[in-house]
Structure formats: structure tokens, C-alpha cells
Image: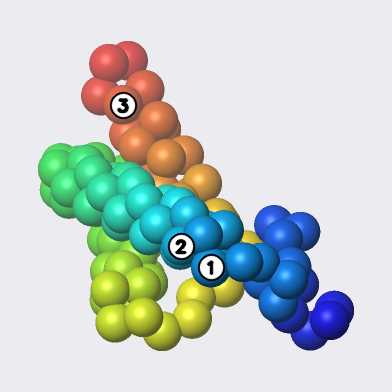
């Protein structure tokens, strides 16, 4: 059964139909929240001033996040570690651009 074990530790092979429906609904809600977070981050990165030192880096991260979002929306697999790295980098760029603006 180990090949059915998911990263969250739940063995889908041993779930009854009600549990499977709850898990599927939970996964769909997580995906929706994840997509909303990505869309918000993309919108904020886009608003960084072109005069900012961080605008070029923000543009690159935006492009990578757009590709990830497209994969997610099309149901294609995305590396969790790569997604986390990009989201963390995006927020770091936002923080730095904000600090630069208010110096």
C-alpha cells in the first residue's frame, strides 16, 4: 500500500467513499486557496515600479509563477519544493521593494 500513501500521510487505498469525498473536497479547496495566493502574489509583483532595483527580478519570478499557475490550472503536476521556493522568493522581493520605496 505504500505506493498509495500521499505526502499528507493518508492512505487513499484504505479510505471509504465518504472519506474519499471529504479528502477530494479538501484537496480542491486547498488548490483554490493556493491559486488565489498565487494570483495575489502575481498582481503585487506586477505593481513594483519599473524604477525599482527589484523590478527585473520580480519580472522573472512572475514569469515562473505564471507557468506554475498554468500547470496547476491544467491539472499538471508541480513540484511542491519549487512552488514553495518561488512563492518565498516572490514575497522576499515584495518585502525588499517595499523597504526600498520607504527608505
Checking the image for residue 21, the label placed there is: 2
Residue 3 x/y as whole percent: 79, 84
Question: In which quadrant of the rendered image does the N terminus lie?
Answer: bottom right
Camera-side residue of 21 and 67: 21
Q: Which residue is mark 1?
A: 17
* Left or right for 22, reference 54: right
Checking the image for residue 85, the label placed there is: none
Q: Secondary structure at mark 1?
A: helix
At a point 66% along the width and 67% down the height, the residue shown is 15
Q: Marks 3/2: CA distance?
A: 43 Å
Q: Secondary structure at mark 3?
A: helix
Q: Secondary structure at mark 2?
A: helix
CB within 8 Å, label 1 to label 2:
yes
Residue 64 x/y as whole percent: 37, 70
Task: Write down the quadrant of residue 65 in the picture.
Answer: bottom left
Checking the image for residue 98, the label placed there is: 3
Residue 79 x/y as whole percent: 57, 73
The mark that comes first in sequence, 3 or 2, is 2
Mark 1 crowdedness (10 Å alpha carbons): few <14, some 14-19, many ≥20: few
Amino acid at each position: 500500500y505504500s505506493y498509495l500513501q500521499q505526502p499528507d500521510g493518508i492512505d487513499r487505498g484504505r479510505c471509504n467513499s465518504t472519506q474519499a469525498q471529504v479528502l477530494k473536497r479538501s484537496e480542491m479547496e486547498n488548490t483554490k486557496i493556493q491559486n488565489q495566493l498565487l494570483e495575489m502574489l502575481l498582481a503585487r509583483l506586477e505593481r513594483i515600479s519599473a524604477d525599482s532595483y527589484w523590478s527585473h527580478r520580480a519580472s522573472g519570478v512572475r514569469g515562473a509563477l505564471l507557468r506554475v499557475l498554468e500547470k496547476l490550472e491544467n491539472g499538471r503536476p508541480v513540484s511542491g519544493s519549487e512552488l514553495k521556493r518561488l512563492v518565498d522568493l516572490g514575497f522576499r522581493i515584495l518585502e525588499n521593494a517595499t523597504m526600498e520605496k520607504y527608505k
